[in-house]
Amino acid sequence: MTDRFAAAVRGLDPRLCVGLSLFLGVSLWKMPVAAVGAAGAFLLLLTLLLGRGVEGGTGARPLLFFVLIWSGVRFGLALWDGIPMQEALTLSGEIALRLAALLLLGLTLSLAVSARRIGLALSWALRPFMGRDAWQGALAFALMVHMIPETRRNLRELRRGLSLRQGRFSLQQRLTLVPLALIRVMARSAWTRAVAVASRRLDGPEAWTGGLHWRLVDSAVGLAAAMILLPAIL
């Protein structure tokens, strides 16, 4: 049942997914806190369903860890400004909730829609403004999205390599070695990505046109989302 649901989500038109993500991303900063909490819970559930069987997991843990760090910094700054502790807790908690929902939204989009299909949707949206040059923005964005799981995979392998080496590394050494090694690995893979783009003939406008089919289910999902989101922000 869950696999069918995940397949149905991945089968939605990428233009609908990207459009809803942009609209919901802006709405998360205007919704009441209760609505943001409900949206965050739904996005977390959706992330878990879409991330089943994905190598390396969903990737939600480091994002939520970042939210905890940022909310802690915000809480400290609020206390530094003389805001009462109860009000500072409320303020930092609200920001943490909105930021967590926003990060989960981006993670859900990356799990539901491939970088290639996101590029097709972006090329379609940019074509009225950029004409035949719209494929360049689509390719750049698709490469950026593609690098997210690649960066996660390289980071995981680097950490595993450090753990297998003899001797122990201090936290300061890890904070120095891992970023430098990651930058070096990603720089070396740039040539591989360029060759892959050229070999698949993605470096031209023809590769970024077509391939999109709007169905009745896309209209139904878009209408249902609008009926749910509009009352939450008005």
Image: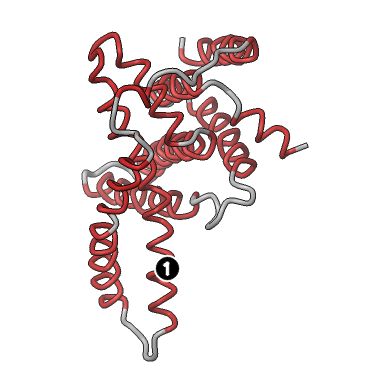
Q: Quadrant of the N terminus?
A: top right
Colour scheme of the picture: secondary structure
Query: Which residue is under mark 1?
Result: 157
Question: Which residue: 33% across, 43% down?
Answer: 84
- On the image, the x and y values in percent for residue 50 come to 60, 41
Residue at the bottom extreme of this rendering: 167
Q: Is residue 202 above or below residue 213?
A: below
In the figure, is residue 11 to the left or right of 95? right
Q: Residue furthest right?
A: 1
* Location of residue 45 by image quarter: top right
| SS at badge 1 | helix
Q: Hey, what amino acid is under mark 1? A: Glu
Q: Position of residue 103 (x, y in %)?
A: 43, 39
Q: Is 200 left, or right, of 49 in this rendering?
A: left
Question: In front here: 123 or 149?
Answer: 123
Q: For the point 26% across and 52% down, which residue is it?
A: 190
> From what the image shows, is residue 230 above or below residue 54?
above
Image coordinates for residue 14, horizontal then vertical, percent: 49, 24
Q: Relative to residue 228, is residue 144 drawn left or right?
A: left
Q: Count the marks.
A: 1
Q: Looking at the image, which residue is at 25% across and 47% down?
A: 77
Circle 1 packing at 10 Å, graded few (<14), some (14-19), many (20+), is few
Image quadrant in which you'd find residue 37: top right
Q: Residue at x 28, y 41 (%)?
A: 83
